[in-house]
Image (cartoon, helix red, strand yellow):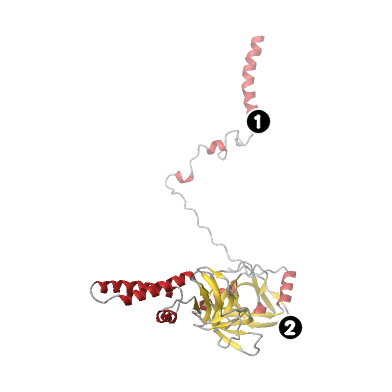
Amino acid sequence: MNRTKSICAWIVFPPLVLGVGLWWGGSAALDGRGFVGPNSALAQGHQHPPSAEKGKPPSAPQAAKPEPLPPAAPPVEIPPDKQKLIGLKTTAAGYQSLAKTIRTVGRIEIDERKQAFINAKVEGWIEKLYINATGATVKQGQPIAEIYSPELLATQQELLNMLRWKKSLKGEGFGALLTQDAEAILEAARQRLRLWDISEDQIRRIEETGQPVRALTLYSPVSGQVMQKMAIQGMKVMAGEKLLEVVDLSTVWVAADIYESELPLIKVGDRAQVRLSYFPGQDYSAVIDFIYPTLSAESRTARARFTLPNPQGKLKPQMFGQVEIKINLGRRLAVPEDAVLDTGTRQIVYVDKGEGNFEPREVTAGLRAEKWVEILKGVKPGEKVASSANFLIDSEAKLKGIAPRTNQ
């Protein structure tokens, strides 16, 4: 009996285990007949790709079709009677001769090319000062100060001693050689006095009188107005110390601030008009002679420089004036400035399509000049755009959910 039960268990147990395993793994791997189907993972592991079939080459991948352009935005309908009511006007886009006027503020400054410092080239004391006030006018060759210097006095004495020795020598034999040496030393003493800004007249007077001069006079090498006076009578000066700052104001500079966005429009040689409130009704014509290569970090402006003649001295440093630079931009496709709505991220115009329909269109704007805006992309010549009341059209478009097509 026990043997019969064991034989039955071995007959029933394997089919039972197989059934439980199939139920646990799911029936997706079996077809309706209980076999592995052709679409199952097990069957696919033994199938060959279609390209490996005999006599059939692998199929080439199809090229992607280009995406169609987005459709034009639906128009905004504004009946003619409402157009008159809101004061709507249209203007045709066309080529215009554009000109831009840059208006800015200019400051009068000194011409740095005519600025000079007068200094002492030898150590000494100022015993007499001829120019004793800031703002005084100095002419070239005018005496400035008398300086006593031990070095100047010793050099004068050396000059006179060599002059006497030269006169005592005979011009024959060995005396001729000594005369040449004395002349060389004598010329060296003269040159030393010249380098200390001692004039030729003073050197000649020293040689003629045979007596050294206690205080020698310094003369101005330039003409102009004294802008700074550091010298004081009786003070000690060192070699290289500045005594006066002299500026020739016969010509002055006008420095005008140009915004960063306007810099590409100007160049050296452009003409401008300068007006000062101190002289109403009088215009000064000037030409840009230099554009500074740096930009102000605070104001985001660069300086353009003009040179103005100032023979009568009316123009004084640190005066302010109005500067106007007229730039000819040539002929460009443009629409009125009021026709372009600037949202901050894009520019939009409303094109008149006729019968009271206005199409919103995104455009690429260029230069702005004298109430006109250059159009680089988005509008063709001859197309009419709304040049007034376009804010009302834009409000109507937003109420209806109409948005302009992105400019391609």
Q: How many labels does the image show?
A: 2
Residue 181 point in image, percent of width and height = 31, 71
Residue shown at the point (39%, 75%) measured from the top left: 160
Q: How far apart are marks 1 and 2 (CA)?
A: 80 Å
Answer whether residue 331 is visible to the viewer in this image: no
Residue 239 point in image, percent of width and height = 50, 68
Residue 32 point in image, percent of width and height = 61, 36
Considering every residue shown, the one lying at the far bottom of the view is 281
Residue 66 point in image, percent of width and height = 54, 62
Q: In which quarter of the image is residue 279?
A: bottom right
User: Is 204 on the left-hand or right-hand side of 317?
Assistant: left
Query: Badge 2 is on which residue?
Result: 87
Q: In which quarter of the image is residue 175?
A: bottom left
Question: In terms of secondary structure, where does tag 1 sit?
Answer: helix
Residue shown at the point (73%, 80%) measured from the top left: 79
Mark 1 / mark 2, whichever is N-terminal? 1
Give the quarter of the figure containing the C terminus.
bottom right
Number of the label disc, if any, that sits on residue 24:
1
